[in-house]
Amino acid sequence: MSLKLNENNIEEIINSMTLEEKAKLVVGIGMPGFFGNPPSRVQGAAGETHSIPRLGIPSTVMADGPAGVRIDPVREGAKTTYHATAFPIASLLSSAWNREIVREVGAAMGREAREYGVDFLLAPALNIHRNPLCGRNFEYYSEDPLLSGEMAKAFVEGVQSEGVGACLKHFIANNQETNRLTIDIIVSERALREIYLKGFEIALKAKPWTVMSAYNKLNGTYCSQNKRILTDILRNEWKFDGFVMTDWFAGNDPVEQMEAGNDLIMPGKVNQIRAEREDEVQEIIKAVKEGNLNEEILDRNVRNILKIIVKTLSFRGYKPSNKPDLEEHAKIAYEAAVEGMVLLKNEDGTLPLNKDSEVALFGTAQIETIKGGTGSGDTHPRYVVSIVNGLMERGFQIDEDLLKTYKDYIKTMRNKEEYKIREGLFGQPVMPKLPEMDLLKDNMVEEAAERTDVGIIVLGRISGEGCDRKPEKGDFYLSDDEQELIDIVSKAYHVRNKRVVVILNVGGPIEVMSWRDKVDAILLAWQAGQEMGRAVADILSGKVNPSGKLPTTFPKDYWDVPSSKNFPGDPPDDPKKVVYEEGIYVGYRYFDTFDVEPAYEFGYGLSYATFNYENLKLEKDESSIRVSFDIVNIGEVPGKEVAQVYVRAPKGEMEKPFQELKGFVKTKLLNPGERERITVSVDIASLTYFNEKTNKWVLEKGIYEIRVGASSRDIRLSGFIDVRN
Ligand code: BGC
């Protein structure tokens, strides 16, 4: 009987594999559908592993990404469509601070992957928001490693509960897009451990099947060729037992990748885009034959891959239905969207709006609503409910004259060459940003303000893979036409004693100081996926009470951010390296420690209800501190609150941030007057700092302050705990 792979015969299989078969197994089959390669059997998927039919090893399929399964929605000659749900971006998901909803989103994506025949979902992405301008921050969760790690962990649990493998990416310090394939990230060991690695360490508890190494170099060595991070830390220290794959076309030495513990090279056959390089399979075979690569290393990597392959749907012979429950998943996308939108300002109860309000909508993003970012994190849903359509569907009276003017304007502009929708990375569409319409014409705003009860301005920003955002007008700062839009609309409504609301349809922070005082309410709606318009409408009407809080600081000015000094690196026009000079002082760790006031701090977000924090109790045992307190809804409507536990360590040998997030909880929906007793357990081990001199985590002995707050700067309860023995 011929030998076929099963869970118990992996060693036997390895022993009977030829060198060529082993080399093939550690290299992908080439990027499907590009560079002359045939499309994947799941068209639009990002990659596939080699099959070895002789030994019963199937090929497995990998598809992006963090906001939904990215595959082609239509296939030539096929009647069936393959749309996947566009979920909200990761920065919105983390704004929900709700592990359960993130787990549900992960599970829904897992089911879609499974039903479309995808074995591995290339998500979650959990790089730290080091700088607000990283073009892919929308795919990432937070500036804080605990929040990032907890969200990623919940996401992995969700995906893998459906039999699909998740992939933690990009390991590590992939915090910018500029020169991402070659940039050298210089970071101290302490910052690496406490800020950049921490989230991955937390997420690994969910046992992801795979990890993707990052494009960049870390302190001089490509991450995919970095034995220290891939083997010493990931495998030996953290006991990761899945396999590591490269990012697509990462690194420059397949043999070093093999030796470093990068088990799989994706998408394979790099010579198709880089002529100077040989086929990776051949390179590996040659290295073994010439004694430059120990075959045992190759065997080790093959073993790591096979141990996971036996768990995959393809190995188990699962027959995908191509019919995921898109109706059900749309509901989950909506639930996540309403949980993660953040109310930034609400003067005198401007929101919620009266349901019969007549509304004038300004800004092109009301119609061209941005569901998510571009590149591999893009999605192809059946539809996207724009903000205007969502508001209309939910019964708001929208000013039709103004709407028609906007529709005509967009149509005319999109016909112009410079604003045409073009093809970006991986054939994903890219939409150049339109300037806002000149509103001074025809008395348009005055008339609209006369006719309607409230003016709503939608401001949009899109960013994506391959390119960072800019500290310029039209990107981090408002453009002149956007400033003018706010000025004109606010004036027209305010002289009539009417209100103005701004909705931010963005993937990351923008400047708000120059304009926020001119408007009455601001809703950070993020890029909320296909259900965006409905979610915005339900928050505006008060059907849903907003409960999101910021996972990332909104600085007053871009140049207040410490990493702005060296982003995107040195030399700035074509950086070769970036020194993370700010060390551990990323996000609120910097703003709080150095007393710099942000526009909106980490953890901030308003509600239509008001919450009291009461009855703090701290208890300590050998391994943890139990922090218990009550949250009471003293408002007039039901709502959920995100309570955050920060810890301030005693002064000691090492310098430390002012405070750090060590736990969080989102309450259930609390009715007016209702109270919930919350308990957050803080592991004492999580209070340690990394001492570079001894290369060890150390616990500073002394009195710790436990700070329970509604945000990092709105601490409601605090107490002290003695950690001296
Ligand atoms: C991205 C990865 C993605 C891969 C496959 C790369 O360009 O950095 O995040 O998973 O492409 O599409």
Image (cartoon, rainbow, N blue to C red):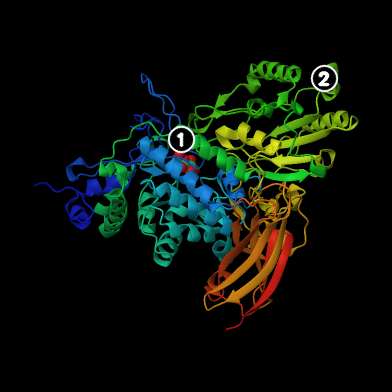
Q: Is residue 20 left or right of residue 612?
A: left
Q: Quadrant of residue 317?
A: top left
> Residue 282 in the image: x percent, y percent?
29, 44
Mark nearest the camera among 2 and 1 is: 2
**SS category of the residue bearing label 1:** loop
For label 1, being within 8 Å of ligand 1 is answered yes
* Disc 2 residue crowd, few under 14, some 14–19, many 20+, Cα 10 Å: some
Q: Which residue is mark 2?
A: 444
Q: Residue furthest left?
A: 1
> Residue 2 in the image: x percent, y percent?
11, 46
> Residue 228 in the image: x percent, y percent?
44, 62
Badge 2 or badge 1: first in the primary sequence: 1
On residue 70, the disc is 1
Amino acid marked by disc 2: Met
Front-most of residues 83 and 50: 83
Q: Is residue 261 left or right of residue 136?
A: left
Front-most of residues 343 and 298: 343
Amino acid marked by disc 1: Arg
Q: Is residue 373 visible?
A: no
Separation of marks 2 and 1 at Cα, in angstroms: 41 Å
* Disc 1 residue crowd, few under 14, some 14–19, many 20+, Cα 10 Å: many
Q: Is residue 65 left or right of residue 502?
A: left
- Tell me the residue at 57%/68% (across/down): 682
- Tell me the residue at 79%/39% (across/down): 350
**SS category of the residue bearing label 2:** helix
